[in-house]
Image (cartoon, helix red, strand yellow):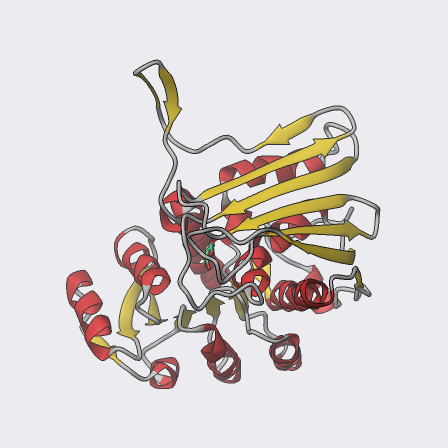
Amino acid sequence: MAVRIGVVGAGSMGAGHARMLAREVGGCEVRTIVDADGLRAAALARSLGVALSGTDGMAAVRDTAVDAVLVASPDETHHALVMECIRLKKPVLCEKPLAPTSAECREIVEAERSGGLRLVQVGFMRRFDPGYRTMKAALTERRHGDPLFLHSIHRNASAPDYVSSENTALSGAVHDVDIARHLLAEEFVDVCVRRGRATRSAPHRVPQFITLETAGGVLVSIEMFLDAQYAYDVRAELVCETATIALVPPGATVLNAGLAYAHGLQADWNDRFGDAYRAQLQAWIGSIADGTPVGASAWDGYVATRTAEACLKSLVTGERVRLVPETVPDFYAEAGETAPVAA
Ligand code: ISE
């Protein structure tokens, strides 16, 4: 029987997920779409042939005809919605961040653990991107020796005004933090954030350079540049003892014209990571059917938010911040094929 999904949030992320769930992902149907902006929810529902829409996220979670919930509403609503899903034993795929504070994430973790069921997946879609998966396989098999460095570049063409220097880590760098933990299967012990120079197009926020060190001594660099203008551009290069592996720009073709060899770039993450989002959703539906968790867990969401808080502290103080790694609870150790493996 198809899994009946309630989609909470009809902004760009929610709409993208709803479209894929309604048209491209097998084994599910979208039962309702809700958004604080009821007209936006209704228009999206109509365009996808979804009969129900509304404005109340909690009502969608509690709808007895909703089996599982996709949360893509504003960050500050995530905690309450996810907690209610856990109370009702409904699987939930929550967009990042799991919650804006590590205290809220911790509450989610504790609620899920005491309920005894793995219900929460966090939308760290890079774990499903083919390029990162190739890196993960190479690392797991130690094909090129041990990892030494991971360079991560995260550039957005532009960002909304409400994204500030202070929440750049929570709203964006959590992706880089999560994929680094996932690839390296190690925890961070230290973070340092340097402020770059503000640009003319966004004088109110600064690009940032984040460095992290893992318990095993791997160094991770993250360039966060939200106002790069030219495209959405995510790059990564993993440096191992005998080789490096880098992501290539996605796209099926290269254009040779006007004395240039041109590889297309994408305008935003929906285009760049379209395949990853699709794979993530399909894996989520599959995991609901067979009960095996996949993707990032509530624990991973907690660690990402906790690391973002440390980034903020370093940004504000200008100092290195030590992170004391916590042991992953056994409850979260077991996971599907895209989960971290022991080093
Ligand atoms: C944005 O906030 C997201 O949610 C996307 O997943 C991410 O790829 C993007 O860079 C962020 O700015």
Residue 51 position in % (x across, y down): 18, 72
Whether residue 1 is visible here, answered yes or no, is no
Residue 37 position in % (x across, y down): 26, 77
Q: Compared with residue 55, is residue 280 higher up or lower down, i.e. above or below?
A: above
Query: In the rendered image, which quarter is residue 31 located in?
Result: bottom left
Q: Is 185 situated left or right of 270 in this image?
A: right
The tally of labels here is 0
Q: Nearer the viewer, residue 222 or 298?
A: 222
Q: Is 304 situated left or right of 258 in this image?
A: right
Residue 107 position in % (x across, y down): 63, 81
**Which residue occupies 47% across, 65% down?**
163
* Screen quadrant of the N terminus: bottom left
Q: Compared with residue 221, is residue 5 higher up or lower down, i.e. above or below?
A: below
**Which residue occupies 38% across, 48% down?**
268
Q: Is 113 situated left or right of 42 in this image?
A: right
Looking at the image, the residue that sits furthest to the top is 259
Q: Is 219 situated left or right of 176 in this image?
A: right
Q: Nearer the viewer, residue 299 or 77?
A: 77
Q: Nearer the viewer, residue 53 or 321?
A: 321
Q: Nearer the viewer, residue 114 or 40?
A: 40
Whether residue 192 is visible here, answered yes or no, is yes
**Which residue occupies 64% across, 64% down?**
308
Residue 90 position in % (x across, y down): 46, 76
Query: In the rendered image, which quarter is residue 228 located in?
Result: top left
